[in-house]
Image (cartoon, rainbow, N blue to C red):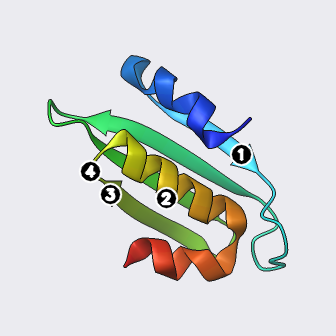
């Protein structure tokens, strides 16, 4: 399942997406939870890994999709997505 396919389901509540992270042995699998918060549609992405949890805040569905893609591409992109 691509992350962007799940974006339409956000209006109904949480979306949980689990996938392997390609090319990064520290994160063999992860779970992303995305949720719309409030009327301004701020989207919170929470990445759960074996070594800790990371929280991201997206200002729009497009930004959330960019963050989701960065998370999918692996550990090196995590820090880029946070900044």
> Where 26 falls versus 39 (above or below)?
below
Residue 40 position in % (x across, y down):
15, 36
Numbered badge on residue 18: 1
The CA span between labels 2 and 1 is 15 Å
Q: Quadrant of the C terminus?
A: bottom left
Q: Quadrant of the N terminus?
A: top right
Residue 19 position in % (x across, y down):
77, 50
Name the residue that disc number 2 marks: 67
The CA span between labels 3 and 4 is 7 Å
> Where 16 falls versus 70 (above or below)?
above
The CA span between labels 2 and 4 is 11 Å
Residue 13 image-quadrant placement: top left
Residue 81 position in % (x across, y down):
46, 71
Left or right of 74 in this view: 44: left
Numbered badge on residue 59: 4
Give the mark nearer the N terminus: 1 vs 3: 1
Q: Residue at x 49, y 48 (%)?
A: 65
Depth check, front residue: 51 or 44: 44
Left or right of 57 in this view: 45: right
The CA span between labels 4 and 1 is 22 Å
Mark 3 vs mark 4: give the one in front. Answer: 4
Contact flag, marks 3 and 4 (Cβ < 8 Å) = yes
Depth check, front residue: 25 or 76: 76
Contact flag, marks 2 and 4 (Cβ < 8 Å) = no
Give the mark nearer the N terminus: 4 vs 1: 1
Left or right of 68 in this view: 20: right
| Category of crowding for the residue at label 4, using alpha-carbon neighbours closer than 10 angstroms: few (below 14), some (14–19), many (at least 20) | few
Mark 3 vs mark 2: give the one in front. Answer: 2
Residue 32 position in % (x across, y down):
58, 49
The CA span between labels 3 and 2 is 9 Å
């Amino acid at each position: 399942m691509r992350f962007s396919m799940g974006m339409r389901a956000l209006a109904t509540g949480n979306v949980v997406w689990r996938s392997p992270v390609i090319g990064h042995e520290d994160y063999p699998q992860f779970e992303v939870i995305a949720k719309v918060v409030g009327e301004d549609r701020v989207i919170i992405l929470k990445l759960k890994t074996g070594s800790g949890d990371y929280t991201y805040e997206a200002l729009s569905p497009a930004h959330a999709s960019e963050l989701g893609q960065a998370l999918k591409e692996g550990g090196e992109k995590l820090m880029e997505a946070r900044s």
